[in-house]
Amino acid sequence: VILEWFIVLWISVHHVSARVPVSAAKLKARRQRWNVRASEMSKNTLNPIRAIVDGMKLTPNPEKPMIALSIGDPTVFGNLPTDDSVLQAMKDAIDSHKFNGYAPSVGYLQSREAVANFYSQAGAPLEAKDVILTSGCSQAIELAISALCNPGDNILVPCPGFSLYKTLAVSVGVQVKFYNLLPEKSWEVDLQHLESLIDDRTTCLIVNNPSNPCGSVFTKEHLRNILAVDLRFASRHCIPILADEIYGDMVFPSCEFHSLANLSSDVPILSCGGLAKRWLVPGWRMGWILIHDRNNIFGSEIREALVKLSQRILGACTVVQGALESILNNTQAEFYQSTIGFLKSNSEICFAELSTVPGLNPVMPSGAMYLMVGIEMEHFPEFQNDVDFTERLVTEQSVFCLPATAFEYPNFFRIVVTVPEEMMVEACGRIREFCARHYRPLSQESNDLDQ
Ligand SMILES: *Cc1c(COP(=O)(O)O)cnc(C)c1O
Ligand SMILES: *[C@@H]1O[C@H](CO)[C@@H](O)[C@H](O)[C@H]1NC(C)=O
Ligand SMILES: *[C@@H]1O[C@H](CO)[C@@H](O)[C@H](O)[C@H]1NC(C)=O
C-alpha cells in the first residue's frame, strides 16, 4: 500500500512539474557557469605553523648542511627507533589475520580495557567504558572540543601552546582565549590571568602537561592550584578540563609526572593521549580519550556525545588496536628510560651551550622533547622579531628553529631535542656564531633611557 502511495505521489509531482512553466526565479537561480567555492569551514581551518613557515624565506647557506631543529617528529633522524617489542606486537597483530575488519567506533573492547588497565590509578580509576580510541591524540582533542563546545563558546588555551587547539576550535566557530605561561616560573600557569579570562561562555580549559613547546612539567602543587581555579568558580562556572597528556610520563628523572585526573576530586577531565611520542610511533595514529568523571558530572550526556562523534569516521587503525594490549604490556621500562635519558642529555647539552650565548635565554625543560629559547631582541636590532631572527639563522648557518610566534609567543624560538647528539652540538655552535655576529650591546643612550 505504501509503495503504491509513493508511486501515486511520484506521478502527481512529475505531472504537476511538467505542466507548470519553470518560474523566472528558478531560471535565474540556475548556474550559468562554473563557480565552485571552498566551504566556510575549510577557509576557517588555519594551521599557524604553516602560515608562518610558508611565509619565511628559508634558503640555507650552501656551505653548511641543513640542520632542522624544528620537526616535532622523533623518528625523522632514525636515532630513536621504537622498541622491538612494539614492532613485534604489530607483526603479531598482522599475522593473526584478526584485525583486518571494522572495529566498533570507540575501539575494540579488549584494546580499551588494556588502556584502562595501563592508566588506572588509585585516585583516578578507569574501566574500558571510560576509554575511546582515536586516530592519534589529535582526533582525541578534536572529539573532546567538539563534544564540549558550541559555536560562540570559548575555550582557554595555554600561551605558548600547541597550535592545533586553536586550529580545531576556530574551524568549528569556537573562540580561543590564551592564558599566559610564565617562563621565569618554569612555564607555570599565570593563574590570575587564567581566572580573569573565564566568562559564561567558557566551556573548556585545556591544560597541556608536559608541555609542547616548553618541555615544562607541572608540580603536584601547581596542578592542584589549576584545579582550584576551577573550583573557586564552582558555583558560577563549572568548567571541564581537557588535559593533553600526550607527553605523560616523558619526564626527566629529577621530577615526577602527575596526571591531572589523579588529583581531581570533582572537576571532570577528558585526558587525551596516545602512542605517538612515548612509544615513538607518531605515524601509527593511535590515540585515546580517558574519561575521568567520578562525580558523574559529564554523565551520559558527554559520553554519548563522544560516542556519536566517534561514529562520523572510524578512528584508530584496527591493526594497531590489535597490537595495543601487547604494546602496553610488554614494552620494558628500559625502553622508556633510555628515551628519557637521551632527551635529558641532549637538553642539557643544548641548555649549557646556549645559556652562555649573550642575548639568548634558554629555559631548561623537565620533560617532553622541546626547549624554548628567549631572544633579547633589543640586542639584535637588525631583526624585527623571532621570525626574522630564525629566518636569517637559516640563511647564514643553515639551522632552522621554529619561531615561537607559531605558538602565539613572540621573541622565543623552539628547539626539538630528539635530533642526534652531534647534530645538536653542531647546531648550538652555529647558533653561537650567529648570535656573536649580530649581538649589539645596548648603547649608553638607550641605557639612560632605560633608567
Ligand atoms: C604531538 C602532539 C599531539 C598529537 O599527537 P598525535 O597522536 O600525533 O595526533 C597532541 N598534543 C601535543 C601537545 C603534541 O605535541
Ligand atoms: C594518585 O592518587 C593516589 C591517591 O588518591 C595516590 O596514592 C597516588 O600516589 C597518586 N599517584 C600519582 C602518580 O600521583
Ligand atoms: C596483558 O597483561 C594482562 C594482565 O597482566 C594479562 O591478563 C594479558 O593476558 C596480557 N596480554 C598480553 C597480550 O600480553
Image: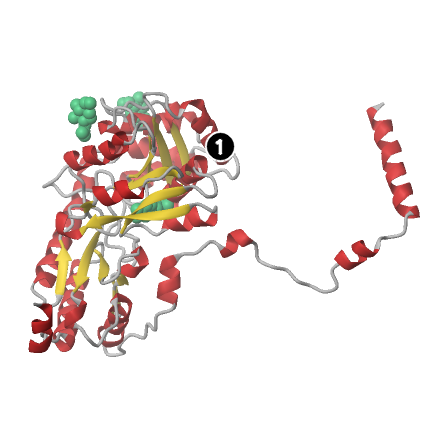
User: Of residues 105 and 436, which is closer to you in this image?
Assistant: 436
User: Of residues 329 and 427, which is closer to you in this image?
Assistant: 427
Residue 68 visible in this rendered orientation of the protein: yes
Number of dots carrying numbers: 1
Residue 234 location, quadrant:
top left
Q: Residue at x 19, y 63 (%)?
A: 423
Residue 286, percent from left and from top: 38, 40
Residue behind mark 1? 105
Q: Which part of the image, by quadrant, shows the C terminus?
A: bottom left
Residue 46, percent from left and from top: 43, 56
Residue 381 location, quadrant:
bottom left
Residue 284 location, quadrant:
top left
Q: Quadrant of ligand 3?
A: top left
Q: Amino acid at mark 1?
A: Ser
Horizontally, is 193 left or right of 426 in the view? right
* Label 1: which secondary element: loop
User: Of residues 302 and 366, which is closer to you in this image?
Assistant: 302
Structural crowding at the residue carrying mark 1, measured as other residues with C-alpha within 10 Å and reported as few (<14), some (14–19) or many (≥20): some
Residue 40, percent from left and from top: 54, 53
Horizontally, is 197 left or right of 322 in the view? left
User: Of residues 126 and 83, which is closer to you in this image?
Assistant: 126
Q: Say above or below: 382 vs 104.
A: below
Q: Say above or below: 260 vs 77.
A: above
Q: Is mark 1 within 8 Å of ligand 1?
A: no
Q: How is the image coloured?
A: secondary structure
Q: Residue at x 28, y 67 (%)?
A: 387
Q: Which part of the image, by quadrant, shows the N terminus?
A: top right
Residue 281 visible in this rendered orientation of the protein: no
Residue 330, percent from left and from top: 26, 32
Q: Which residue is at the far right?
A: 19
